Image: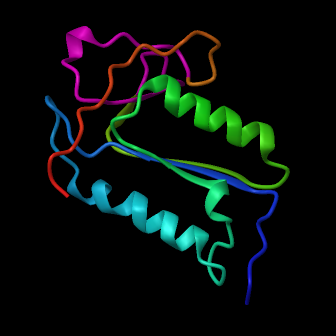
Amino acid sequence: MRVEQSGSRAVLFGVHAYDHLPALDGVRHNVPALRDLLTAPEVGGFAGEHCVAVPANSTPTALLDAVQDAAVHATGLLLVYYAGHGHFGRDGRGLLLATQAPARTVRTTRSPTTKSEPSWPTPRPSTAS
């Protein structure tokens, strides 16, 4: 069975290496594996150019730009996938995505949907493959 996703878009992002949190070794492999499945014609049906795996060492702006671009062009499903550490904000509503920065240097936004620029630091590039 072939799945048609011509109007759909996917953005995949994962952080596996942290300075102050335990590493998540599975994340390093699950984002590329998920992209492979989503772009397989018999499984996900996404065109390769419509399924973006944002590199783990990307800036917050690059991640948000990828999500915004996908949202603008999606006429069907919009899939945004994050793998990594995260926790809820003090209000219990906003989900905060963790990076490798020390806790005292991280400023947070209330919600990923706020209009202000998020202020989390960039994850460090992985040295292992």
As drawn, which residue projects farthest toward the right?
75
Q: Nearer the viewer, residue 32 or 78?
A: 32
Vertical order, 105 against 8 (above or below): above
The residue drawn where x is 78% and y is 37% is 72
Q: Nearer the viewer, residue 62 or 44?
A: 62
Q: Position of residue 114 (x, y in %)?
A: 62, 16
The picture quadrant where one finds residue 13 is: top left
Q: Is residue 108 magenta?
A: yes
The residue drawn where x is 41% and y is 58% is 31
Q: Is residue 77 magenta?
A: no
The residue drawn where x is 37% and y is 31% is 87
Q: Position of residue 28 (x, y in %)?
A: 29, 55
The picture quadrant where one finds residue 8 is: bottom right
State how the image is colored. Answer: rainbow
Vertical order, 129 against 82 (above or below): below
* Segment colored magenta: 88-111
Vertical order, 115 against 6 (above or below): above
Left of 117 or right of it: where is 108? left
Q: How many marks?
A: 0
Left of 57 or right of it: where is 60? right
Q: Position of residue 99 (x, y in %)?
A: 30, 30
Left of 115 or right of it: where is 84? left
Q: Quadrant of the C terminus?
A: bottom left
As drawn, which residue projects farthest toward the bottom?
1
Q: Quadrant of the N terminus?
A: bottom right
Q: Position of residue 91 (x, y in %)?
A: 49, 16
The residue drawn where x is 34% and y is 44% is 84
The picture quadrant where one finds residue 115 is: top right
Q: Magenta part mainly helix, strand or loop?
A: loop
Vertical order, 113 against 55 (above or below): above
